[in-house]
Image: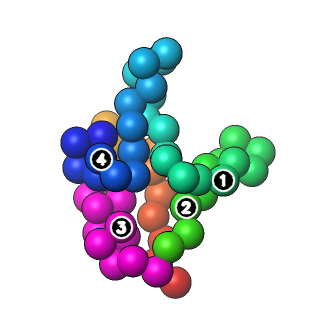
Amino acid sequence: MELAPQQFQMSKKDGKSVLLKSTDKKGFFTLKSNDDLIFDACNNAAKACPVHIISVKQR
């Protein structure tokens, strides 16, 4: 995705976004980081997501 290219990549197979360096648990992909820049980038991507499938939480 253009807003967070270090965290997301568009799949050439189906055109969906893929969360890079994530873990998959029952179809939910998770990336844990303490880096505020990653949080900000992913939060911006979530806001821009046309299908509202991205969820971001800060601990």
Establish if 9 lies above or below 31.
Answer: above
Residue 18, image x, y percentages = 48, 38
| Label number found at residue 31 | 2
Q: Which residue is mark 4?
A: 5
Give the main secondary structure of the magenta stretch: helix
How many C-alpha atoms fall within 10 Å of the one at disc 1: few (<14), some, or many (≥20)?
few
Q: Are marks 2 and 1 in contact (CB under 8 Å)?
A: yes
Q: Which residue is mark 3?
A: 38
Q: Which residue is mark 1?
A: 23
Residue 7, image x, y percentages = 40, 52
Residue drawn at the location 75% of the way across and 50% of the way down? 25
Q: Are marks 1 and 4 in contact (CB under 8 Å)?
A: no
Q: Which residues are magenta?
A: 34-46
The mark that comes first in sequence, 2 or 3, is: 2
Is residue 21 highlighted in magenta? no
How many C-alpha atoms fall within 10 Å of the one at disc 4: few (<14), some, or many (≥20)?
some
Q: Are marks 1 and 3 in contact (CB under 8 Å)?
A: no
Is residue 41 highlighted in magenta? yes
The mark that comes first in sequence, 1 or 3, is: 1
Quadrant holding the N terminus: top left
- Res 34 visible: yes
Amino acid type at circle 4 is Pro
Q: CA distance from mark 2 to mark 1?
A: 7 Å
Q: Are marks 2 and 3 in contact (CB under 8 Å)?
A: yes
